[in-house]
Amino acid sequence: MSKPRILFVGENDGNSRRLVSFLAGMELDVERSAVLPEPSALTSPAGQVSLIVVAAAEQGEEQAERLRTIGAADPRPAVVVLSDASRSRALLSLLREGVIDHVASPGGDLAVYSAVRSGLALVRLAAENEACRKNLAKSRIERSRNVRRALELEEIYDTTLENLMTALDLRDVETFGHSQTVAKYSQVLAGLLGIRDEKVLDNIRKGALLHDVGKIAIPDSILKKPGRLSDQEWEKIKLHPALGHGLVKEIKLVKEAGNIILHHHERYDGTGYPEGLRKEEIPLEARIFALADALDAITSHRPYRKERDFAAAREEIRSHEGTQFDPRIVEAFEKLPLTRWERIRFETTRLLPSIIDYHKLASRT
């Protein structure tokens, strides 16, 4: 480790030589000069010093101006002036300006030692602060880049989810718009239950969008069969939650989304699938989704039945409270008037293409 460089400014007399020797004994790299050098000489890499000890016999205005210029340099060396009490008034203004850091008696070795150590500590602290400032600025730049990168990845991720959801809808045009609608219903229900964390709400949205992703692995001959499914075909349909969860767990989908995909067909009384969970064993987000899914199914057209209005949906949901649905979720659902739920559905689906256009699109795939 290199020694701190000290510039001693003073006449080549006995006292100056003694002080230079004394400072050298403090394990400092001491250079001597009869006069203060030009400030430009101190800013070059070869001329930079940590501390200047000024022991010149005269400390007039010219020297004060030179010290002011040195004090404005970057990096700024600490300045210790050795002076007796007779010059203290003149030096006071320089101390107040911050041009010099310490004044000590040239004959007091302990005072000189203390002033030099304090000056070096100031320089070291200033250097550490500057390093911290640069590191902080670098960290802010890097964080800004990471935020931009994360936002870009999030956009790509959301687009991928939307495209995957669209691919699912194209397989079954009868459930056109279902994923977007149940995603919105689920978020609203979660909010009514007091969930305010934006990340959790967005994760619920993602899980709702992808709840049927496992149907990708179900053959069209089963998925689109117009008649009643056989027991064997029904067992294959019941595999789609586990299949979907298996598909997405490799991309480390967040907990809430994975829970919806795996458990959206569980029932509050334990008669659902794939694991037969009951009550609070079922993740809250899956219980939320179960009601949202039923609300959209009841109020949507299906080949085997006509859609029903929201009043009928409310009565059916009430009739399955405690069996299919968590009573707490039913209570949250009823906090909003039916007109609000109708409005949510309208706002969610109004920007989608018409079902006729969607049939045309599906026929081309």
Image: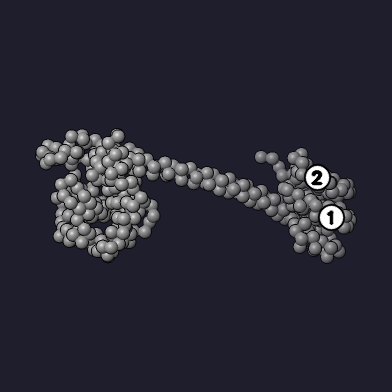
Which residue bears the numbered disc 2? 40
Residue at the spot 33% in from the left edge and 46% down from the top edge: 353
Residue at (10, 38) in percent of width and height: 230
Q: Is residue 263 left or right of residue 121?
A: left
Give neighbour class at mark 2: few <14, some 14-19, many 20+ (Cα, 10 Å).
few
At label 1, counting other C-alpha atoms closer than 10 Å, the crowd grade (few under 14, some 14-19, many 20 or more) is: few
Q: Nearer the viewer, residue 359 or 78?
A: 359
- Disc 2 residue type? Ser
Tell me residue 311's x, y (percent): 20, 61
**Split into 4 quadrants, where in the image is the N terminus?**
top right
Residue at 14%, 37% in the rendered image: 233
The residue to which callout 1 is attached is 65
Q: From the viewer's perspective, is 329 left or right of 52?
A: left
User: Closer to the camera, 18 or 67?
Assistant: 67
Q: CA distance from mark 2 to mark 1?
A: 14 Å
Disc 1 marks a residue whose amino acid type is Glu
Residue 361 falls in which quadrant of the image? top left
Residue 137 location (% of width, % of height): 59, 48
Residue 198 % position (x, y): 39, 55
